[in-house]
Amino acid sequence: MGLKAGDNVLLPSFICRDVLAPFNELGLCINFYNVNELLQPLNLENEVKAKAIFVVNYFGFETYLSSFLEYCKKNNSLLIEDNAHGLFSKSKDGLFLGQRGDLGVVSVRKSLPVENGAILFQGPDNKSLQLEIITHSSIRLFVKKTMRLFVRLLGINFFLTLTKLKRRLRKSIYGTEVPVSSNEDELIIPMSPNPADIDKYFLTIDIDNEILRRRELFKLVGRILKSDHVRPYREQLEAGEVPYGFPFFCEQNEVERIKEKLKNNNLEIVNWPDLPSHLVENVPAFYKNLYIVKFLW
Ligand SMILES: Cc1ncc(COP(=O)(O)O)c(C=O)c1O
């Protein structure tokens, strides 16, 4: 794409730290722009001139591009669209999110029960979907998929108890219930691009059903949290939006209560994002108050 070591790139500061790794691996110079509470960019016109600017469609919701397109025009920059969260989500114009920039990426594993894999959109001349299929098999995936068959039979609580036991065991061995990120994750892409069983899992799913599943879950969680002290990132879905989860802002003293309430509905939350280490101390307070109700077990 014509980017070379030392070139400036501009990323949102509201970002997961591991997103930095590909930019760091290429030796690019990462600059950050801040976002407001609607997660739209603040004052892009005052930002450094960068060869590429990165826009994120947070949680599968459309981020409006007008200020990014102005920035790109003024600085002759590339627009990279991150739609890691929004598999199958579309803009008001009916384009897949991720398909609107010069380059777009979509994560598969965040929304479907696969281990890894991604979709790359390349534009503006070639807007086609490029899917590389590698039939490398995963035992972990096989076990998980088999277990899913038994959920209806044994009930979700059985599996939630199993998960709890697994996390306790992990904590006693590694010190944390779930893997935690490290500074290295900002510098190095953790594994080689080697999607597992993506043909079996991704190419055989009922897409309409998956879209319906995530949209209905969003509405359900909205109803569960309606009278609570939380501010949903979005109250409603646009026609083409397929959410990754149910994102909401919540003061830290309320989190445990909300967690408990969701647990009683067999739902789990995670705090997002795991911010880049050198930004953690200097970001707006609301950056640390965002939680997502997960839609994938
Ligand atoms: C906004 C965003 N982009 C990209 C990624 C990377 O996605 P993956 O881990 O599937 O490569 C993440 C991961 O957390 C993310 O939150």
Image (cartoon, grey):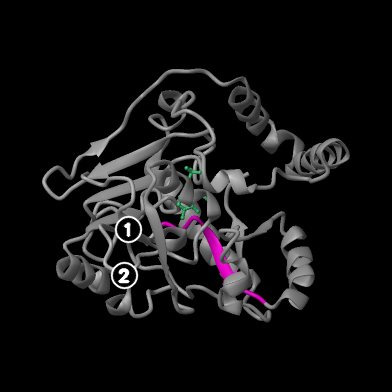
- Find the residue positioned furthest to the front: 6
Q: Is residue 244 magenta?
A: yes
Q: Which residues are magenta?
A: 242-250
Marker disc for residue 48: 2
Q: CA distance from mark 1 to mark 2?
A: 8 Å
Q: Are marks 1 and 2 in contact (CB under 8 Å)?
A: yes
Marker disc for residue 39: none
Pointer 2 local density, CA inside 10 Å: few below 14, some 14–19, many at least 20:
some
Q: Amino acid at mark 2?
A: Val
Instruction: Give the percent coordinates (x, y) of residue 73.
Output: 15, 67
**Which residue is at 64% across, 33% downward?**
148
Residue 117 appears in view: yes
**Which residue is at 50% across, 40% downward?**
109
Marker disc for residue 8: 1
Pointer 1 local density, CA inside 10 Å: few below 14, some 14–19, many at least 20:
many
**Which residue is at 44% across, 62% downward?**
58
Q: Is residue 72 magenta?
A: no
Instruction: Give the percent coordinates (x, y) of residue 144.
Output: 64, 30
Instruction: Give the percent coordinates (x, y) of residue 75.
Output: 19, 67
Q: Amino acid at mark 1?
A: Asn
Whichever of labels 1 and 2 marks the residue nearer the N terminus, that label is: 1
